[in-house]
Image (cartoon, coloured by chain):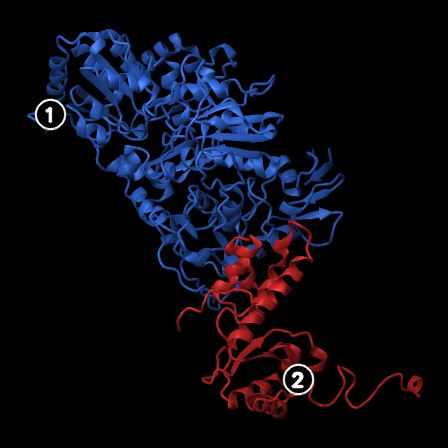
Chain colours: A red, B blue
Amino acid sequence: MSAPPPFRFSARNEAEVQRILARYPEGRQASAILPLLWLAQYQMREETGSAWLPRSAIEHVADRLGVPRIRALEVATFYTMFNLKPVGRFHVQVCGTTPCWLRGSDEVFRACLVRGLRKGETTPDGLFTLSEVECLGACANAPVAQINDDTYEDLDFVAMGRILDELAAGRTPPPGSQIGRQASCPDGGPTTLKDLVA
Amino acid sequence: MPRVTVDGIEVDVPQGATVMQACELAGREIPRFCYHERLSIAGNCRMCLVEVSPGPPKPQASCALPAVDGQVITTTSEKVRKARAGVLEFLLINHPLDCPICDQGGECDLQDQALAYGRGYSRFAEDKRAVAEKDMGPLVKTAMTRCIHCTRCVRFADEVAGVVELGAIGRGENMQITTYLERALTSELSGNVIDLCPVGALTAKPYAFAARPWELERTDGIDVMDAVGSNIRFHARSGAVIRITPRLNDEVNEEWLADHARFGVDGLKERRLDRPWVRIDGRLREASWPQAFAAIRRALSGVEGSDVAALVGDLAALEEIVALKDLLTGLGSARIECRLDGAEYAGHPALWRLGPTLAGLETADAILLVGANPRVDGPLVNTRIRKAVRYGGADVFRIGAPADLTVPVTELGDDLAALTRLPTAFLEARRPALLLGSRNATLPVLAAAGRLPLPRDDWNGFGVLHTAASRVGAMDVGCHMAGGLAALTRQPPRVLFLLGVDEVDLRPFTGAFLIYVGSHGDRGAAAANVVLPGAAWAEKPGTYVNLEGRVQRSLRAVFPPGDAREDWTILRALADVLGVRLPYDDLGALRARIAAEWPHLGRPGLSTLPWDPAAVPAAPPPSGPTRPGPAHLYALNPILRASPTMQACIASIVEGQGAVAEPVVA
């Protein structure tokens, strides 16, 4: 793969950069390194279909903030939310931590596997990259997966398969719980304080 | 002052001290890896755990915990012992047990502390982590599997060297110390990370697999690669100096050492003059000592004293300088010159000293650099400037060509006329310091700089930044003449002694009979009519006066090669052949002769001389650009030019970096 062109913020994102920088006191602009790297990764998705940070993006952000490049690289490599190599159009992050695992994350991974998604790899059509991640912070709705910006909850083999098929077909399945409950309300209606409700 | 109790011992500690410092005041040893006195506190190795009451019921990292009044600290309890053993067991989980092939073996903090505080066995049966080596250039060898992530090297590069090139990428078990895109370290102080590394992750590349520390004979010395006079230790085996490490001296080099001083040592083995040479029919031919002396006597016969002159090189020790001066006096000449860089200071010794002193420079609140680049001229002067800026908020101004100093600099342009219109921020500072590059210390500059209001009641802000280790000593004993080197080139002598002179354009002296005394076959020897093989600085006991005027003694680590001799004994023997009587037969007598005429050079220590306004010369105001110095410090003198390691530095660091790739993350 040839080297990507030098990264520059688009005109629209440039306005966003200014808005982010204004949040920090004068002289403390280096604090904006996380939001700017995050913005750069979004822009990469818009421009190339792959949400990742090439070296030129890290260096551009570092130079913009007057931060040594090694410091920006430290930040970019510390947080798993930054992808340092290209990912597919849909970055499928399935939680494998204990609560999700107890609630059947192995089945979710199997649903991915039968569609050709392997952990840490991108499918040949460039559509999906599968990552096993640590806790996504939605244990009450385990097992969960995060696909790009959306969280899909209460998954099982069938639900995960359906979501991947929908995405592959170019449609966006509704995020959230896949068994119809609202947020993390009890499955099947209220279980406590019923009297007060009545 | 808070009063704390450490293992039943009551101690008063300074306000702001840490629990670790309190324990040390009480005489308790606290093991540590990440903590270092001269770096910021990281608190990430957890080796320094102690019990502190009042406080949480778990061991505390003592390096990062402030000592407060009434604390009761326990360092010897069973809980502390177990905590330390536990930390060590975790550190050793991923540390390879390759001590037999590790260059740190025998001087390794992890080895020592595992022995003293460890369990003696591991319960970890799983696979250990392996980390790819990093290429950090020609000086620092890496074995990153051994790294325990103390981040001392990262903090050193950030805080002391000021070159932010090292970092820790990744997280948790995948954390790796690396340079950005694995480029070579470009700092002129990079070798210090080798000393700082508590394990064998960063070791010296030129010293790789060369020796074990217990085989080495250690000798205390003084560095001569620049004029700072860093305190060093020669490590020798089988008659060869294998490596050089710094010695602690808070007033000079703290505990750092510049790369050319540390790694130039392999130049001692290359291009050495190990026998006399005499030029016959235009070609240098091997000769014996009597033949070489006879050739000199023939050349001097019938030559007037005023037709004899001598130049003192940058690496010469005080003893041979005085012997040379005495020899010239005996021959009836006073034409001896040490200011080979064109400097014109003379008269009062305060005019060629670093008035603020190295440690005092840290307290300056405004620093003006005139035609000096401390990163090349004296890297350990630059660390002091950095401290003044980082901790004292000093402003730095510069007259001269811009160069990265690792601190913010206000440029006043490359025109010496700026000396007459300095910003008030400098003139009205409480402790202003002027650093005048020696090569730019011409009479107009000295006249303008000497009249600045720098000397105060308790502060002398006038300072010359020398680059030659021999300079201040040679000036103090009067090795300078009216008109300097320029006068010598206008009126070339018939016979010219060169005491290790390799940096001077010798073309004006082609008609003269050149006698070179020195250690390396460099430019001076190539032009000489007679070459007398001398000893390099590690091969002779010598006195050096650093740029502050600090008299320091270096000891002999090894003997010079072949027929080479200590320089002052060569001059003493030659004097006999020439019929001049030098009244000293051993080093003690020579030093007594020096002490008799210049008492301040007779005893080690700082020789401070009060500022004398009357000594400032009168001259027209300066103008024009400054004289530039060398671009890098890897080829300043014949020893460095002979060093394969320094040549590798030039190829890799100065002449460019290789191609770079995308960062690779595990």
Q: Which residue is mark 2?
A: A103
Question: Horizontal placement of B497 versus A9: left or right?
Answer: left
Q: CA distance from mark 2 to mark 1?
A: 93 Å
Q: Is residue B364 left or right of residue B140?
A: right
How many numbered circles does the render carry?
A: 2
Place of residue B522 in the rendered image (x, y in percent of width and height, measured from the top left)? 22, 32
Question: In front here: B593 or B329?
Answer: B329
Q: Residues within 10 Å of mark 2 (few under 14, many from 20)?
A: some
Residue name at image x 29 percent, y 13 percent: B325
User: What amino acid type is highlighted by mark number 1?
Assistant: Arg
Q: Position of residue B191 (x, y in %)?
A: 42, 43
Question: Which residue carries the number 1 mark?
Answer: B279
Rendered position, B372 above or below A47 = above
Q: Position of residue A185 (x, y in %)?
A: 78, 83
> Is residue B8 visible to us here?
no
B251 left or right, relative to B105: right
Disc on res. B542: none
Q: Secondary structure at mark 1?
A: strand
Relative height, residue A68 to residue B93 (above, below): above
Asked if residue A143 is positioned above or below residue B65 in the image, the reply reads below
| Same chain assignment for discs 2 and 1 | no
SS for dot 2: loop
The residue shown at (45%, 63%) is B663
Mark closer to the observer (2, 1): 1
Judging depth in this view, the residue of B516 and A102 nearest the camera is B516
Q: Residue furthest left?
A: B281
